[in-house]
Amino acid sequence: MLRRSFLAGVVTLALAGCAKESPPRALLYRLTITVDTPEGQKVGSSVARLWIGFGDGPLGGMGAAIFFNLKGAATVVDLGPRGYLLCLLWRDELRRGSTGQEGLLVPFAARPYRDRNMKMPQAIDAVVEARPKVSIPLKSLPALVRFRDPSQPSTAEWIDPANLDAVFGPGVAIARVDYEILGKPPMKPGAKLTDEIEVPEITASVARLQAVIPWIRLPKEKIAEMVKGSDLDPYSKNFYPGRGVIARYYISGVGDEH
């Protein structure tokens, strides 16, 4: 009898936790990378939508307290004859401190708005209202990649953000990285969070990336053929998980992942 009562209490508490969780939020952000070169400064930016969910009900401590869904594309910086610098959506798993683009929100943009008495959903609301623009340290940047031949995924090279000159030549260095909150994404009146209106800046960011590396739209089987025999081939002895050419590292939430 006691066991039944205990189980009933757990179920009741779980249902209450689901009912009391904070509703998700959504925001737009712009990531801008400015690079110094001997030819002058080069700037690239991208806009993405970040959907933030919470597990802050009574059982929130038993699971993830916050989770994300990203819609957007890697940031592209055109360095002219030197090639393209890509800042991916994913972290560089071999670089300590690196985080994915979704991981930039809480430690950098939200931290000044969250005190000990403010819960995370309210902190996100404050960030969206304030629309801050903050600087991101180089060590925290997501994976940086360039392709010796942008038409061939097998030519990918991962880059140390503090040593761009080793890849792009003397005098090339990241001058600054800006992360800016742009407010809420446009929604239809009375729509659910998933019923989004197209954001032209996101569409343009995706198109820019697809123009630079057109193979990203190919089926994953075709991409696997293109990297066969290189270090990006999962069957290569030099392959490292997390440094493969995977579409979701470059584009997310826009129907091009495969």
Image (cartoon, helix red, strand yellow):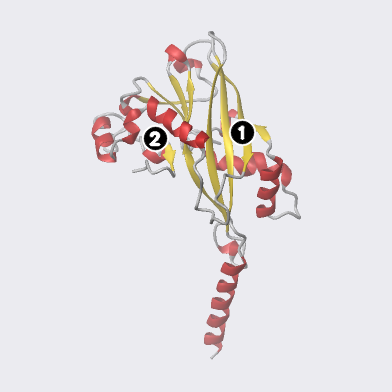
User: Which amino acid type is shown beneath numbered disc 2?
Assistant: Arg
User: Which amino acid type is shown beneath numbered disc 1?
Assistant: Tyr
Q: Can see residue 48?
A: yes
Earlier sequence position, callout 1 versus callout 2: 1
Residue located at (38% from left, 26% from top): 211
**Depth check, front residue: 65 or 40:** 40
The C terminus, quarter of image:
top left
Q: Residue furthest bottom?
A: 1
**Depth check, front residue: 111 or 47:** 47
**Depth check, front residue: 242 or 172:** 172
- Residue 80 in the image, given as x and y percentages of width and height: 45, 14
Q: Residues within 10 Å of mark 1 (few under 14, many from 20)?
A: many
Residue located at (31% from left, 27% from top): 154
- Location of residue 59 (image quadrant): bottom right
- Residue 180 in the image, given as x and y percentages of width and height: 63, 34
Query: Which residue matches tag 1?
Result: 179
Left or right, 128 with respect to 242, comes to right
Report the disc number at residue 243: 2
- Residue 26 in the image, given as x and y percentages of width and height: 58, 48
